[in-house]
Image (tube, helix red, strand yellow):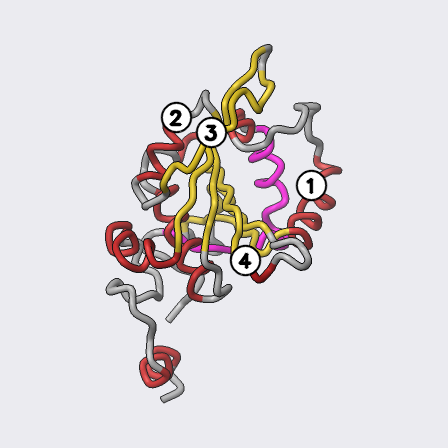
């Protein structure tokens, strides 16, 4: 049982220095502006190491999304992260998911598969109850993607984002643990470690899969 693998993808911690050049390339992608609302002031190689360290300390999970079938090492094609609950708020069991895929690897189902893996991790390992995600008014395709794995729209922050000379809405979505286990895990069919029927493994089943029986 490999918890860092799904059907076609592998997940590598963002602290892996072998992928610093990829992280730099990823930050040059126009698509990063679909989730990063900070002022676009450029990004340099010198900023890569501090940025990765910040993500490692401030995020609950931060991983490169990789294609595994390469001669030596998995090849990163994107990144995902789950926010770390604030101090004294961990009891609410909530996190926010963000995801970016390099442009040439979009529309191949990788985003849906990576989201499914992240949801399995959030609910099966981190014992979370709710995962939130958001998209901006200029990126309706993201909303359609999130809907296909079970996220439901919960509200709209009207004209909350100033971008390229105008005000834009921010759409907020979320999925709950029982919604994921009850239907959407099987629909996503990402072939992670998790059982498709939404149930949890028994100690005996885990022992068998881990080779410790």
Q: Earlier in the sequence, mark 4 or mark 2?
A: 4
> Which residues, given as a range, are shown in magenta?
9-28
Label 2 Cα crowd, 10 Å radius (few <14 / some 14-19 / many 20+): few
| Label 3 – label 1 distance at C-alpha | 33 Å
| Label 4 – label 2 distance at C-alpha | 29 Å
Residue corresponding to mark 2: 140
| Label 2 – label 3 distance at C-alpha | 13 Å
Q: Residue furthest top?
A: 165
Magenta segment main secondary structure: helix
Q: Earlier in the sequence, mark 3 or mark 1?
A: 1
Q: Is residue 135 above or below residue 12?
A: above
Is the C-beta separation of discs 1 and 2 under 8 Å?
no
Residue corresponding to mark 4: 92
| Label 4 – label 3 distance at C-alpha | 22 Å
Label 4 Cα crowd, 10 Å radius (few <14 / some 14-19 / many 20+): few
| Label 1 – label 2 distance at C-alpha | 29 Å
Label 4 secondary element? helix
Image label count? 4
Residue 48, numbered label: 1
Does residue 191 appear left or right of residue 41 in this picture? left
The x, y position of residue 111, in whole percent, is 39, 41
Q: Earlier in the sequence, mark 4 or mark 3?
A: 4
Residue corresponding to mark 3: 156
- The one nearer the camera, 88 or 127, is 88
Q: Earlier in the sequence, mark 2 or mark 3?
A: 2
């Amino acid at each position: 049982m490999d918890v860092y693998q799904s059907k076609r993808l592998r997940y590598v911690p963002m602290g892996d220095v072998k992928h610093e050049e990829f992280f730099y390339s990823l930050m040059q992608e126009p698509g990063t502006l679909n989730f990063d609302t900070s002022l676009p002031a450029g990004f340099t190689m010198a900023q890569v190491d501090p940025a990765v360290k910040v993500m490692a300390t401030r995020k609950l999970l931060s991983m490169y999304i990789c294609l595994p079938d390469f001669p030596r090492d998995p090849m990163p094609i994107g990144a995902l992260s789950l926010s770390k609950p604030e101090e004294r708020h961990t009891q609410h069991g909530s996190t926010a998911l963000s995801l970016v895929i390099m442009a040439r690897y979009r529309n191949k189902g990788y985003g849906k598969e990576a989201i499914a893996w992240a949801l399995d991790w959030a609910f099966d390992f981190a014992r979370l109850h709710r995962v939130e995600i958001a998209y901006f008014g200029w990126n309706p395709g993201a909303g359609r993607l999130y809907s296909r794995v079970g996220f439901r729209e919960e509200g709209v922050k009207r004209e909350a984002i100033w971008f390229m000379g105008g005000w834009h809405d921010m759409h907020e979505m979320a999925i709950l643990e029982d919604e994921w286990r009850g239907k959407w895990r099987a629909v996503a069919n990402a072939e992670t470690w998790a059982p498709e029927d939404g149930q949890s493994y028994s100690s005996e089943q885990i022992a068998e899969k881990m080779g410790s029986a």
